[in-house]
Amino acid sequence: MEENTVTPSAEADDKSNFAKGSIPRTILRLALPMTMAQFISVAYSMVDRIYLGRLAGAQHLALTGVGITLPIILIVTSFAYLCGMGGGPLFAISRGKGNDQEAERIMGNSFTLLLIFGIVLTVTVITLRKPILFLFGASEDTYPFAGDYLMFYTMGTIFNLVKIGMNPFINAQGFGKFGMMTIALGALINIVLDPIFIFALGMGARGAGLATTIAQFCSAVWVMRFLTGKKVVLRLKLSCMKLQAKRVRSILTLGMSGFFMTMTTSFAQIVCNVTLQRYGGDLYVGAMAVVNSLREVMFAPMQGISGGASPVLGFNYGAGMLDRVRRGIRFSALLIVGLSSLMWLVLMIAPSTLIRAFNTNPELIRAGIPAIRIYFSMFIFMSMQLASQPVFVALGMPKHSIFFAFLRKAFIAVPLTLLLPMWGMGTNGVFIAEAASQLLGGLACFSTMYFVVYRKLKTKAEN
């Protein structure tokens, strides 16, 4: 990764200038490939659960075991968001101000942080995986599947962090299609290798974890080759990787929103699994694994749209073009809420069909149908939070975003998850708790974004 003075093409420079052209068209140009990337990423993770849900003789235990690893995987992934969602908006704002040198340093520092986190997390998870899994809801029946899968999955931690954490720096330069290819490449390899390792080679859960690690390695190589190549406007350079305290603080502070949102999701999921294990056993933990998979599908388009909007909002905010920022907020919010409404309708109408994609166990289907309908009953309000929270991050306002990350999960969902089952609601109480948090958290976040950001941008623009 040596320095050079290659001048980016005029086409690349035009693509990366978000101050020109229609705001909706600019957002869609980035959001469409990023949405595809999110759907591919969901397939990437879900294919393991789908294949293992059909593992001979395992019934729903393999699916449940892999589902129990999800909170740990989320914790690991949160460190990628810490660097990517922290560095990416700062990178876009610096570019909007015309400070390309600082933008490159932000990218280089983010990469170094990802490597450090990757090494520490790999050693920690491999060493402590057994006590962690039992603490998080595993049983003697599900641990063999959970332990095997997590062991092999964790070996690709560094590759996973680089893939997720550095991809925003591709998208922030206007190369949404290349960002999509990062995810697509890994997903394709994982889908091809999974049946070979799981069934043909008889590796079971270990095979699913190993296939994912190989796929993540290939995606990480793709990211590195692109960011050090000649197509990008700003490249990853060795000279920019030396950590600087002030810059690191800025990256980590802004990235705390995505970090805490993912960490609190993980924490809430741990509480859900443990509570479901207590009141319903492995069957209901398996039902939650299906619910989580469907939630990932629901999140995919919203994360793609907000990911496409974020660099556009940050660039225009840095350039002082506040009316364009308002138009971007308005367009992305309407698109996110509209799409979530359509997906919500499908979930309410056909939950049993969706469950059968993972497992055909009649008991799991009977448990899963009411779980899905209750859990997602207020999801439209959740989409309002998903439309609002990235706005705070894109405009460099981390405190608001961090607060709402905590509010929905840590202050609403977790207490209710513990209390409602004790008040006679049993396993249904776990799913009702999530629905309540979506309603309250979504309304609070959207209202704050509207009054604190959206309306004030109009006042500033007029002055």
Image (cartoon, helix red, strand yellow):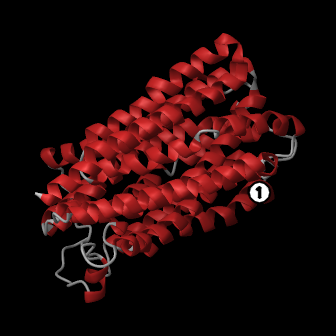
Residue tagged 1: 201
What amino acid type is highlighted by mark number 1? Leu
- Decide which of 28, 451 is in the foreground and name it: 451
Secondary element at tag 1: loop
**Residue occupying the far left of the picture:** 463
Residue positioned most to the bottom: 10
Which is more toward the observer, 461 or 42? 461
Left or right of 384, for residue 400: left
Residue at figure coordinates x 35%, y 68% from the top left: 170
Which residue occupies the extreme top position in the image? Answer: 423
Name above or below for residue 157 compared with residue 120.
below
Which residue is nearer to you in this view: 332 or 394? 332
Residue 166: give x, y in percent of width and height: 36, 60
Residue 108 can be seen, yes or no:
no
Q: Is residue 170 visible?
A: yes
Image coordinates for residue 123, horizontal then vertical, percent? 44, 38
Q: Residue at x 16, y 81 (%)?
A: 5
Query: Residue sitting at 59 percent across and 64 percent down?
Result: 187
* Residue 219 position within the rendered picture, expressed as x and y whole percent measured from the top left: 49, 65
Quarter of the image that includes the N terminus: bottom left
To which quarter of the image does residue 184 belong? bottom right
Dividing the picture into quadrants, the one containing residue 124 is top left
In-image side of 402 versus 429 (left or right): left
Residue 211, compared with residue 288, is above or below; it is below
In front here: 277 or 448?
Answer: 448
Determine whether 274 is above or below 6 in the image: above
Q: Residues within 10 Å of mark 1 (few under 14, many from 20)?
A: few
- Locate the C terminus and report the quarter of the image it occupies: bottom left
Pinpoint residue 17: horizontal percent, then vertical percent. Answer: 25, 76
